[in-house]
């Protein structure tokens, strides 16, 4: 199972990026994670550039999604929604309409925030937009990591393995379930 992971934060010490980097050590070994490193290089969406031969960073982003079994987005909440860089990446991946990379793709949304009881609006907005792009969206309050500054230590600390699974298990189960649904539909 190949998962393309996208951090919605460009920040060097991002909690969301740290969360994605920590996942392979606690996920089942059949899950392989590739963290997409080209978010900052994506141009602002411009329909004039969205031609048969779009810019190389856009081709790389679309191909990376197409080749993955699932896309995992871990993102901060900015002003009660999701960051503009994430929307820009989604806009590129939502076109061209008949063969868009997001079409039918299993996409799991996680939100990591140092805040308490925050992240729900980001989760809801991002899930709706992805759903409207016809992705199979896996989301939910249990995929919001509040107080990420404290809880990330659980993921990184190998001696607290039980705690790590409380963060990672829901994602693993949901991706697997989505895959089973897709398989069932294909039969
Ligand atoms: C934030 N932050 C924030 N946090 C939150 O839980 N809800 C929110 O609405 C916002 N709004 C917001 C707006 C802007 C412009 C910034 C820069 C920050 C705080 C945010 O969660 C915090 O900076 C995280 O550390 C950002 O995630 P990364 O970069 O650590 O992954």
Image (tube, grey):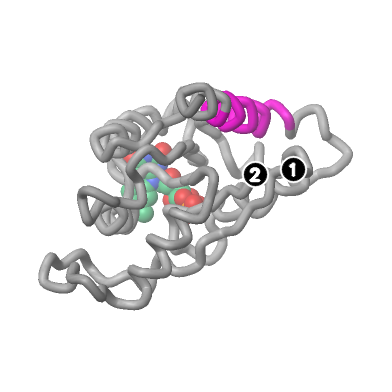
Which image quadrant for residue 82? Answer: top left
Whether 178 is among the magenta residues is: yes
> With 149 as the anchor, is 153 left or right in this view?
right
Tell me, yes or no, if residue 123 can be seen here.
yes
CA neighbours of label 2 inside 10 A, class few (<14), some (14 to 19), many (20+): some
Q: Determine the secondary structure under disc 1.
A: loop
Measured in 3D between alpha carbons, the distance from the residue under mark 1 to the one under mark 2, in whole angstroms, is: 6 Å
- On screen, residue 173 above or below 98: above
Q: Determine the secondary structure under disc 2.
A: loop
Q: Residue furthest left?
A: 48
- Name the spot of residue 134 as percent of width and height, x first: 29, 36
- On screen, residue 146 above or below 93: above
Q: Which residue is mark 1?
A: 30
- Name the spot of residue 39 as percent of width and height, x first: 41, 65
Which image quadrant for residue 167? Answer: top right
- Residue at position x 88%, y 39% from top? 159
* Whether label 1 touches label 2, CB < 8 Å: yes
Q: Which mark is residue 158?
A: none
Q: Residue furthest front?
A: 187
Which stretch did the figure color magenta?
Answer: 165-179
Q: Which residue is mark 2?
A: 1
- Name the spot of residue 83 as percent of width and height, x first: 32, 51
Q: Where the N terminus falls, by quadrant? A: top right
CA neighbours of label 1 inside 10 A, class few (<14), some (14 to 19), many (20+): few
Instruction: Characterize the magenta stretch by its predominant secondary structure.
Output: helix
Question: 80 or 69: which is nearer to us?
Answer: 69
Question: 18 or 150: which is nearer to us?
Answer: 18
Mark 1 vs mark 2: which is more N-terminal? 2
Q: How many marks?
A: 2
- Residue at position x 26%, y 40% from top? 133
- Residue at position x 76%, y 29% from top? 163
- Residue at position x 31%, y 54% from top? 93
């Amino acid at each position: 199972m190949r998962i393309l992971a996208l951090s919605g934060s460009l920040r060097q010490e991002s909690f969301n990026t740290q969360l994605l980097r920590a996942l392979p050590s606690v996920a089942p070994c059949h899950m392989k994670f590739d963290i997409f490193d080209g978010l900052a290089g994506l141009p602002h969406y411009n329909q004039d550039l969205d031609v048969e031969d779009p810019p190389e960073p856009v081709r790389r982003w679309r191909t990376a999604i197409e080749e993955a079994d699932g896309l995992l987005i871990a993102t901060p909440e900015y002003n009660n929604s999701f960051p503009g860089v994430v929307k820009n990446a989604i806009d590129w991946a939502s076109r061209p309409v008949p063969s868009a990379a997001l079409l039918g793709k299993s996409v799991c949304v996680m939100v990591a925030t140092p805040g308490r009881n925050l992240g729900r609006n980001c989760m809801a907005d991002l899930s709706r937009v992805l759903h409207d792009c016809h992705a199979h969206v896996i989301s939910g309050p249990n995929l919001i990591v509040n107080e990420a500054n404290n809880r990330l230590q659980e993921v990184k600390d190998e001696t607290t393995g039980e705690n790590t699974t409380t963060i990672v298990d829901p994602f693993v189960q949901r991706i697997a379930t989505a895959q089973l649904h897709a398989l069932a539909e294909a039969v």
